[in-house]
Amino acid sequence: MRIPYSDIACPKQAAKQLARFSPHVRLSAAQEVLARKLGYRNWHELEVSTRVSAAPVPRHMPNEDALHFVLGISDALGLPDADVQYVISKSRLVRNSPWSMDDQLSIRSAIWRQRLFGPPKRGKPGTVVRDRAHGANTPAYLKQAGRPTHVLFDTGLGIRADFEVVTPRTALADFVPSRLWLPYGYWTLKDGSEVIFARDYLPMWRIAEGVVERLTPWLWINGIIDEFFFAEAAATVAWARGSARQLALNHLSKHRIFELPKLVDVMPHLFEADVETVGDSVSRLQQASGVGHVPPYAQLNTLLALD
């Protein structure tokens, strides 16, 4: 499949962003990999093939193809799948319009199934099971089988008796837990900016003068003067569904946030045996990634016991 472009702006932006993620990735290497994955012999052919047009050249890559596209670039450049997905979405590389949040969640959960979990199987961590406790029929990821059984629900980690967890004969759909990406509220800071945070009060996004910044979840945000909770505004305790969920989604859309936050990248660490909370998994992600840049409005979150 060859993706057409009316100009070189989108591929050039994507190549620059990919090169920024690692000191080991040269811009020229990112350009060549992108060109080949987009269906061209090399970057030069991509450049000369672009044609100036008054209207954008239509492009729409299906999710299944987008999944292979993300994985191919990740393998070729040695970059994390999550960072590649973020860049492709942010640069509008394979679609004229942004991926919807459902698209983002579908692609990320498919990446996990292929890279992290493998085929589902009874008793295997990462298999989507059914929680039958208290008459429920709720899907959850199996974290650790046994007595008790540890599971990961849409809203967080939990424990069940072994007989309360059932492995269906037909595999259930994978999902990205709302705990890792759905806003719980936002803080207003002294400088007038806004920081959107998750259910565990971990930062996800900062909006300042219309510019959106993706934040690392191990930051402690300073200078908070006000806070807003979507569930409180919706007069409900059900923060991950119903009216509160819709308010949170509307807020993301209002700020044109169509990508997934860095917090979602903790998913592999949640399945480590000695990780008991989302905070534990954030600590593991920070250890694996490095602290990185700490902005002036924040500091490291020492409550996470980061090393």
Image: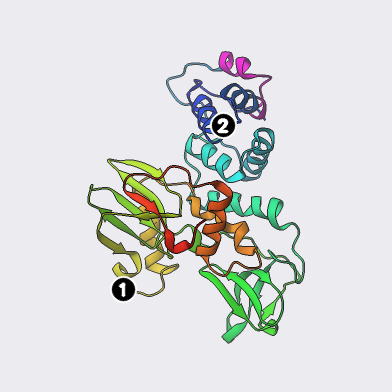
Q: Earlier in the sequence, mark 1 or mark 2?
A: 2
Q: Residue at x 69, y 54 (%)?
A: 116
- Which quadrant holds residue 49? top right
Residue 280 drawn at (x, y percent): 54, 64
Q: Is residue 10 left or right of residue 42?
A: left
Q: Secondary structure at mark 1?
A: loop
Q: Is residue 97 left or right of residue 274?
A: left
Residue 146 magenta:
no
Q: Could you tell me the amino acid type at mark 2? A: Pro
Dot 2 alpha-carbon crowd within 10 angstroms: few under 14, some 14 to 19, many 20 or more: few
Q: Nearer the viewer, residue 175 or 112?
A: 112
Q: Nearer the viewer, residue 94 or 161?
A: 161
Q: Secondary structure at mark 2?
A: loop
Residue 46 magenta:
yes
Residue 238 drawn at (x, y percent): 41, 73
Q: Could you tell me the amino acid type at mark 1? A: Ala
Q: Which residue is mark 2?
A: 23
Q: Main secondary structure of the magenta part?
A: helix
Report the coloring of the rendering.
Answer: rainbow
Q: Which residues are magenta?
A: 36-49
Q: Which mark is residue 264?
A: none
Compared with 232, 176 (above or below) is above
Q: Which mark is residue 235?
A: 1
